[in-house]
């Protein structure tokens, strides 16, 4: 969008927050870059240039606006609904792959050379993978500076910088303030670091309807790993350097996030996975606008706009849970998962009580005795085959997975039908166009709304909803009174 100058200028002049994260406005006369909704008086059109990313602005020599804080805007929705190499690269960078494995590791995961990855990211985002990762490190540093009382040296290494000097130079360059200056400007009530917990605000594009989002997570919560408490969804997180516990609660204009981490280096990855879990980088205006063109869906969208797709923090975990949930009730699926957690999960300490384990990894389940599972024999085979494929690396599941290829691999496994493959594609892989025509709830909603109820006919009818059929699924599910559609008290 940043190449459409006229449209960008209109968005800046109208201070339209819907475009935050889509592009960034750099002002050549001040050397500052802003989000489109910046509250200051808009500059002259001739003084504005537009960039596709904060990293591109920083690479061009612009520093972040202290008023609108463009580095904290919601991420671009482009990386959620696209499946090409650039989108997969951006999802991996957000998950910290460049910091942990370098650009060669990023390229290897994508199946390209480092030169090809550099070229593609520069062409589309105006910045290479190192610059994009640097921008993410700068934002993490700012977050820690403003919300904790940690010493600056600890913050530097927790944010991923190789030295305190590099940390200081980057903060000055990006924010035009030294780290101590950023901390001095932060409101005192936001500087919280109680018992190792970090309290953050996760932004999103309005509207956001939380009922089905948090209702789904709470209704399917696995005891010991997840819970709903005091108006917040809480769960344990398995992270690259350690583990964490997060509490997420819907608030007007943001999601309240409280994180407790065993290693602060995991902060950017934890935030990225929480945003992905709640689908916070979606563009609800674009999604709902498209679905409203269908006269059957329009009343459902108008009744509760801004529904998100409840996703996951761990694709392998969700795939295992999807198999456990085949042809059984939500309560039975939770029971089966809880037994696996108790027997094979890693114990963790929850200062607030309630959460006891991390969900077991495929490696931990690889030696599972099928006879101990209270499942039909065919489903035991399905589960053990899936676990084996995940543990051996034959079925890689993650933010970089190719949606079509992974769906085909899943369907090749015994016991995997279209419903299981597509629910994994929708919630674990993030495919916004995944559709569940065989789902009982979808067929029931289709019948009540006068839509075709047979899978083939419904799929043909749903072609008009592409590329947002996963969101149409949320609106159809919401016609039922199932607990997944209700925000817990």
Image (cartoon, rainbow, N blue to C red):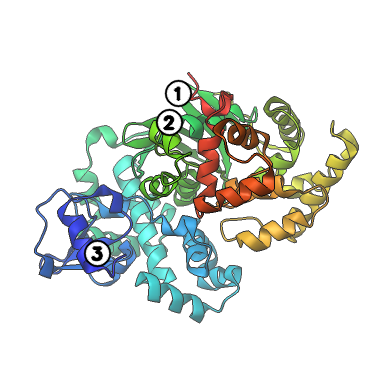
Q: Nearer the viewer, residue 371 or 21?
A: 21
Percent across and percent down for residue 298 are: 42, 39
Asked if residue 3 lies left or right of residue 265, the reply is left
Q: Residues within 10 Å of mark 2 (few under 14, many from 20)?
A: some
Residue placed furthest toward the top:
489
Does 66 sit above or below residue 168? above
Percent across and percent down for residue 445 are: 59, 33
Label 1 sits on residue? 231
- Residue 245 visible in this rendered orientation of the protein: no
Q: Residues within 10 Å of mark 3 (few under 14, many from 20)?
A: some
Percent across and percent down for residue 101 are: 55, 66
Indicate the secondary structure of the residue bearing disc 2.
strand
First-in-chain label (2 vs 3) = 3
Label 3 sits on residue? 173
Asked if residue 285 lies left or right of residue 58, the reply is right
Which callout, 2 or 3, points to the residue nearer the camera?
Answer: 2
Label 2 sits on residue? 249
Q: Nearer the viewer, residue 480 or 487?
A: 480
Does 309 sit above or below residue 158? above
Q: Quadrant of the N terminus?
A: bottom left
Indicate the secondary structure of the residue bearing disc 3.
helix
Percent across and percent down for residue 315 are: 62, 49
């Amino acid at each position: 969008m940043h190449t459409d100058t006229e449209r960008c200028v209109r968005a800046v002049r109208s201070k339209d927050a819907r475009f935050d994260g889509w592009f960034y406005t750099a002002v050549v006369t001040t050397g500052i870059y802003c989000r489109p909704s910046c509250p200051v008086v808009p500059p002259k059109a001739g003084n504005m240039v537009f960039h596709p990313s904060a990293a591109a602005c920083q690479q061009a020599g612009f520093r972040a606006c202290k008023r609108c804080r463009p580095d904290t805007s919601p991420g671009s929705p482009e990386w959620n609904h696209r499946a090409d190499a650039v989108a997969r690269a951006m999802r991996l960078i957000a998950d910290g792959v460049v910091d942990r494995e370098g650009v060669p590791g990023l390229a290897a995961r994508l199946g390209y050379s480092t030169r090809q990855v550099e070229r593609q990211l520069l062409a589309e985002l105006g910045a290479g993978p190192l610059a994009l990762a640097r921008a993410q490190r700068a934002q993490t540093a700012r977050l820690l500076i403003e919300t904790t009382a940690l010493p600056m040296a600890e913050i530097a290494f927790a944010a991923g910088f190789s030295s305190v000097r590099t940390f200081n130079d980057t903060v000055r360059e990006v924010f035009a303030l030294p780290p101590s200056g950023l901390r001095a400007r932060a409101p005192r009530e936001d500087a919280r670091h109680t018992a190792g917990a970090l309290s953050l605000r996760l932004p999103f594009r309005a509207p956001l309807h939380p009922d089905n989002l948090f209702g789904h997570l709470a209704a399917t919560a696995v005891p010991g790993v997840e819970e709903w408490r005091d108006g917040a969804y809480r769960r344990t997180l398995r992270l690259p350097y350690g583990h964490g516990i997060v509490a997420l609660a819907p608030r007007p204009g943001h999601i309240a996030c409280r994180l407790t981490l065993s290693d602060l280096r995991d902060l950017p990855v934890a935030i990225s996975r929480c945003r992905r879990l709640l689908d916070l980088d979606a563009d609800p205006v674009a999604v709902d606008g498209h679905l409203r063109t269908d006269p059957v869906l329009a009343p459902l969208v108008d009744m509760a706009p801004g529904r998100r797709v409840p996703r996951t923090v761990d694709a392998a975990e969700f795939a295992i849970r999807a198999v456990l949930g085949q042809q059984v009730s939500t309560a039975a699926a939770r029971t089966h998962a809880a037994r696996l957690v108790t027997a094979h999960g890693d114990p963790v300490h929850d200062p607030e009580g309630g959460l006891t384990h991390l969900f077991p990894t495929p490696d931990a389940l690889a030696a599972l005795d099928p006879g101990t599972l209270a499942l039909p024999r065919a489903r035991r085979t399905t589960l053990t085959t899936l676990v084996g494929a995940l543990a051996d690396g034959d079925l890689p599941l993650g933010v970089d997975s190719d949606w079509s290829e992974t769906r085909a691999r899943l369907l090749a496994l015994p016991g995997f039908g279209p419903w299981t493959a597509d629910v994994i594609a929708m919630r674990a892989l993030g495919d916004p166009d995944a559709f569940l025509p065989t789902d009982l709830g979808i067929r029931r909603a289709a019948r009540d709304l006068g839509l075709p109820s047979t899978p083939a006919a419904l799929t043909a009818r749903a072609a008009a909803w592409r590329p947002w059929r996963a969101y149409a699924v949320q609106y159809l599910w919401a016609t039922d009174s199932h607990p997944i559609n209700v925000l817990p008290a």
